[in-house]
Amino acid sequence: MIFRNFSDYLNTSNQFFLGIPTVNVGSVSVIQMNSIEFPSVSSSCSIMQKEAFLKLYSEYLERSALASNYQSTENIKCFDLLSGRINILERGHLSYGKNFITGYCDTTGTSSNPFSSSNSVKKAIAELIEKNELIFFWYLNLGEKIDINDSKVKSLIGENLLANYEIFLFKIGILSSWFTVIGILFKDGQVVSTGICCNENYKCALEGAIQEMKILRVLNSYKLYSNFPLTQEEQNIIYKKICHFENKIISSKLKKVSSDLNLSINEMISDLNIAILSRNKFTAVVSVYSSSLIKCLPIKENLMKCVEVDIVKKIGINSIINTPDCIVL
């Protein structure tokens, strides 16, 4: 039983799983390759214990696959969903660090689902899309506010025990037909947590973003330092930026990718490639990338390594430099 001794390495916000979304964080094992220790801590949010453990383990598999391909020069086949062509790439370009295709790579666009290859591909694509939609939202102020007083939204916020915080929710859909929801949580004008989720279903995207906010809020309570080490001036600037956000939408031309995936993407995206990072067919880890998009968190440090990627060129370096660093994780 894989989780027989896992309780020694797991923290949960409610060990009894009493029908409310429960945050879980833990590590199956330390991931080391060539004397380098890679990220190994996983997190999840679920009302069911079994699902929580499976989500944690899936994230562990993703991180393990990324680490095992670090700086590998071995070739891997990638299938382009747009052209139908098979491309050859060195495995190391889909692992941590710099590369000549997407500029820089972290866990973005990587997914594992042992029960559904289709869902695994969808999740990887969604992760890639959400981080790139985030660039438009944060650095160009594009998107729409979501009414947090809507009864369904208030219900989700209450279920996740976040009603005592000041919450801002936004939606954006420039790069695809799927929905991306972004959430930012404040307490007394200070950033407490953030969340983001992309899904073909709006309600699922909304639930996912709110649960992400809950996860990060709980993780911050475990740590001696915050994920948001901001000065008071930076806190004030970001709070003002979010409070005074005005709806701004731009039209985009979409092209159909696949009926099976129920996905259309912006014409600016020239390719959308899928690769299987893992070598074990029973624990398949999917990686999705595009030469038009970044494959990492859009913080300034990362974006400076991605200046040749189409989406970064479209945003413009000046917009990035003149905006506070992105805090949405």
Image: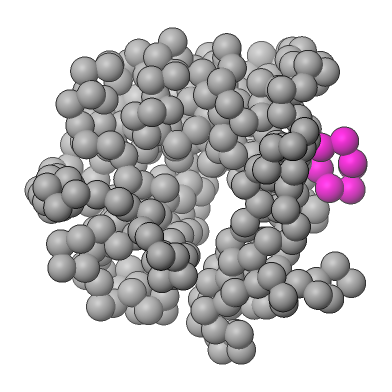
Which of 220/162 is in front? Answer: 220
Task: Name the residue: 27% across, 16% down.
Answer: 316
Vertical relation: 231 (above or below) 309: below
Residue 258: percent from left, percent from top: 63, 31
Residue 203: percent from left, percent from top: 44, 60
**42 within the magenta span:** no
Task: Name the residue: 46% across, 50% down.
Answer: 197
The N terminus is located in which quarter?
Answer: bottom right
Q: How is the image coloured?
A: one colour
Vertical relation: 282 (above or below) 54: above
Vertical relation: 313 (above or below) 250: above
Task: Name the residue: 33% across, 16% down.
Answer: 314
Residue 7: percent from left, percent from top: 72, 77
Which of 207/160 is in front? Answer: 160
- How many badges with numbers are in the image? 0
Q: Magenta stretch?
A: 278-284
Residue 167, quarter of the rendered image: bottom left
Residue 155 seen by the camera? no
- 114 vs 259, left or right, is right
Residue 183, quarter of the rendered image: bottom left
- 288 vs 215, left or right, is right
Task: Name the residue: 41% across, 65% down.
Answer: 224
Which of 145/45 is in front? Answer: 45
Residue 6 seen by the camera? yes
